[in-house]
Image (cartoon, rainbow, N blue to C red):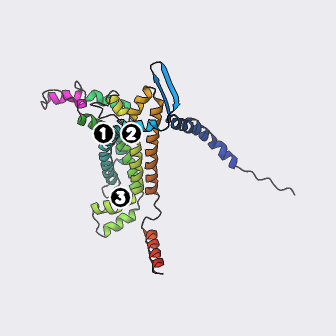
Amino acid sequence: MKKKKSISYAKWGYIFILPFFVTFIIFSLIPLVDTVRYSFYEYYRSGIKEIGPNFIGIANYLSLLKSDMLKYSTNTLILWVIGFVPQIVIALVLACWFTDARLKIHGQQFFKVVIYLPNLIMASAFALLFFTMFSTNGPINSILMSLGWIEAPIDFMGSVLGTRSLVGFMNFLMWFGNTTIMLMAAVMGISMDIFEASELDGCSSVKRFFYITLPLIRPILAYTLITSVIGGLQMFDVPQILTNGQGNPDRTSMTLIMFLNSHLKSKNYGMAGALSVYLFIVSGILCMIVYKMTNDTDPDGSKKAAKKKAKEERRRR
């Protein structure tokens, strides 16, 4: 009797995921390798004359360290903090509020949609809207003057505080809805038995938040933090449109990606490649941090305590 030939379906899995790998190699891996390669070359355009590519080692990296890159890094960090701090605070408050069974809030789905709506608007459209609203001839100044609160129009984008506040406020509006939905899902994933037990033990709402809710949603908080930082490093469209690509006033709103874009516009591919590598390294470090934070194999410290005890016993021997 002939043995039936078994059919292997494994090859179909490889065939189905093949387009992904082909796309990844062509559009991600090859450009990444090419960017790293160009970062070691002098390659730019001067007028109609093209210089390079000439191998110059790490000269581009050293030139960036001597440039205003650190200043633009500080600008990027400040703009991110202004948007992220109120974003995470309000998202946590709303998440705990909407998921509290004792409040019995009606119309939660409606509020979720309203909160998430700003995230669907393109950043460029958002920036253009705020540019129009807060200009010297815009509706905000007109309303304030008609109410008699100010005598002359305020140049919101003419001051460092005004420009940075507008950029941070726009980033907050665009992303706090997404953060709120994620944190709501994280809080809803906590067993209600834990909250009921804490209530029976006389735990107050504040203590329950700090000692139960926050520790249990730590992985999602870490994920939110790191993705927000990486998004902050890539901040470009809002300050670019709001300041017309100049980073005014006095380049205090110039971000790293705007700095990178200026090198690309001037066809300085070597410097642009070196700056991209710097950003890639920082993003990689942040990804490693979130991996360590979210993959804690010893959350209660028992393994560490056992190792310490074993080490002490070996010393006694």
Residue 64 disc label: none
**Cα separation between marks 3 and 1:** 25 Å
Q: Is residue 79 left or right of residue 304?
A: left
Lateral position of residue 78 relative to residue 276, left or right = left
Q: Please, what is the three-letter code of the amino acid marked with disc 2?
A: Leu
* Residue 109 pos. (x, y %): 38, 46
Residue 214: mark in rendering: 3
Instruction: Identify the secondary structure beneath mark 1.
Output: helix
Badge 3 vs badge 1, beta-carbon distance below 8 Å: no
Q: Earlier in the sequence, mark 3 or mark 2?
A: 2
- Residue 172 vs 52, above or below: the answer is below
* Residue 168, numbered label: 1
Q: Secondary structure at mark 2?
A: helix
Q: Disc 2 designates what residue?
A: 65
Structural crowding at the residue carrying mark 2, measured as other residues with C-alpha within 10 Å and reported as few (<14), some (14–19) or many (≥20): few
Q: Are marks 3 and 2 in contact (CB under 8 Å)?
A: no
Whole-number angstrom distance, CA of label 2 to CA of label 1: 26 Å
Pinpoint residue 102: horizontal percent, then vertical percent. Answer: 31, 58
Which badge, 3 or 1, is on the more N-terminal residue?
1
**Is label 3 or label 2 in front?**
2
- At numbered mark 3, what does the secondary structure look like: helix, strand or loop? helix
